Amino acid sequence: MMINFNSILSLLSPHDNKFLPLLKELAGVMVRASALLSELFACTDKERRDELCREIKVEEINGDKVSARILKELNNTFITPFDREDINEISDRVEEIIDTINHVAQKVSLYSPQHFSPCMTRMTELIQSGTVEAQGAVNELDSLKKNDTHFRHHYKEIKRLEEEADGVYEQGITALFRDETNPTELIKLKEIIQELEKTANKINNTGKVLKSIFVKYA
């Protein structure tokens, strides 16, 4: 039987509490980036779109900085509130969401599509809702052992939103190839919607990590 040395010590020693605030800070960056993304796809003004893409890039840089701080603290801290692998996994998955949101925005900036399809707008709404649920779960980590009801609701809702996003994506791709007559716009929109679908999948991956933490610690 393998013994987790860090888990045993965590029962005997005080926890370093800097990690949960850092994870909450990173989750906040994720939610702000997703809100900007949703605004981007609802916007029709070209100058405002460009501004929103730049703001999303700023959040992506902020996310990188927080992730680097988490990694530095993991390297310098002996006792952590959860296994250091779990803290690192949450940080990596949330950072991936922020990165992918930025990829969507940069493709919008690069391609300057003439319009967005309704399915794209809906997917950004689902992405924003998914990040809010992921943030909610991260915020519940410090009370997971006392009351897991809200935590379980968050990761289950992440899965539901991802399944809805899959359906919207499939309908959107079908409609795109059926209705878009401009080949150049077709290519642009196809790449953007695929990046949106990838973002939804990244959020679901984060939900899976959160679920595994629930199984381990609740």
Image (cartoon, rainbow, N blue to C red):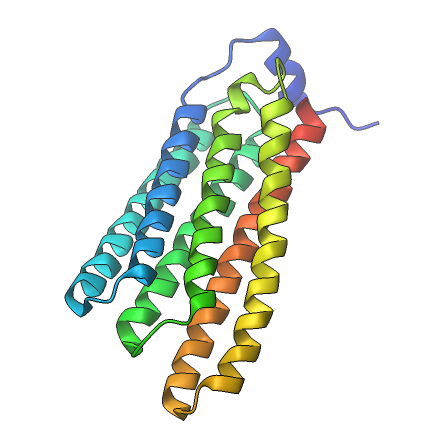
Q: Nearer the viewer, residue 161 or 29?
A: 161
* Residue found at x 30% / y 55%: 39
Split into 4 quadrants, where in the image is the N terminus? top right
Tell me where residue 25 sits by quadrant: top left
Q: Nearer the viewer, residue 82 or 195?
A: 195
Q: Is residue 138 visible?
A: yes
Tell me where residue 186 sits by quadrant: bottom left
Split into 4 quadrants, where in the image is the C terminus? top right
* Residue found at x 24% / y 67%: 44
Q: Position of residue 179 (x, y in %)?
A: 48, 85
* Residue found at x 27% / y 56%: 57
Q: Is residue 43 left or right of residue 97?
A: left
Residue 151 position (above or below residue 62): above
* Residue found at x 46% / y 35%: 135
Q: Position of residue 47 (x, y in %)?
A: 15, 66
Q: Position of residue 24 (x, y in %)?
A: 41, 30
**Residue at the farthest left position:** 47
Q: Position of residue 53 (x, y in %)?
A: 25, 60
Tell me where residue 12 sits by quadrant: top right
Residue 98 position (above or below residue 184): above
Residue 53 position (above or below residue 71): below
Q: Is residue 209 visible?
A: no
Label tally? 0
